[in-house]
Amino acid sequence: MEEFCSNKTFFPNFKIRYIPRPQNTMADKFARGARSSPSAMLYVDSLPPAWLSNPVVS
């Protein structure tokens, strides 16, 4: 929560609103699909790996 509070200043128009699942079935379907799909990148932490921040271009 502390990280969220410190980062919310970067998004002045950001709002969180609860929408019950029965009223938002399409978004729920997409979210379930995304969770079940394999991902090329897995994050254990909230920060991306250092090599991703500074890619090496050959």
Image (spheres, rainbow, N blue to C red):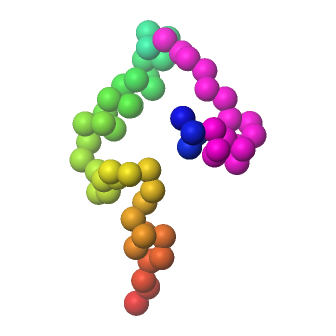
Instruction: Pinpoint residue 26: horizontal percent, then vertical percent.
Output: 43, 23
Label count reads 0
Question: In this view of the protein, which residue sits in the foreground, 31 or 12?
Answer: 12
Q: Quadrant of the N terminus?
A: top right
Instruction: Pinpoint residue 40: horizontal percent, then vertical percent.
Output: 29, 57
Instruction: Pinpoint residue 19: horizontal percent, then vertical percent.
Output: 53, 15
Above or below for 37 versus 19: below
**Residue drawn where x is 39% and y is 31% of the image:** 30
Q: Is residue 37 left or right of residue 55?
A: left
Residue farthest to the right, as pictured: 12
Q: Is residue 16 left or right of residue 13?
A: left
Q: Is residue 20 left or right of residue 2?
A: left
Above or below for 43 versus 25: below
**In the image, is residue 8 part of the stretch drawn in magenta?**
yes
Q: Quadrant of the C terminus?
A: bottom left
Above or below for 48 versus 46: below
**Residue drawn where x is 44% and y is 14% of the image:** 21
**Residue drawn where x is 66% and y is 41% of the image:** 8
Above or below for 28 versus 38: above
Highlighted magenta segment, given as a residue range = 5-20
Q: Is the stretch drawn in magenta largely helix, strand or loop?
A: loop
Question: In this view of the protein, which residue sits in the foreground, 48 or 57?
Answer: 48
**Residue drawn where x is 40% and y is 73% of the image:** 51
Question: In this view of the protein, which residue sits in the foreground, 17 or 23?
Answer: 17
**In the image, is residue 31 part of the stretch drawn in magenta?**
no
Instruction: Pinpoint residue 3: horizontal percent, then vertical percent.
Output: 56, 43
Residue 17 lies in quadrant: top right
Q: Is residue 25 left or right of residue 43?
A: right
Residue farthest to the front, as pictured: 2
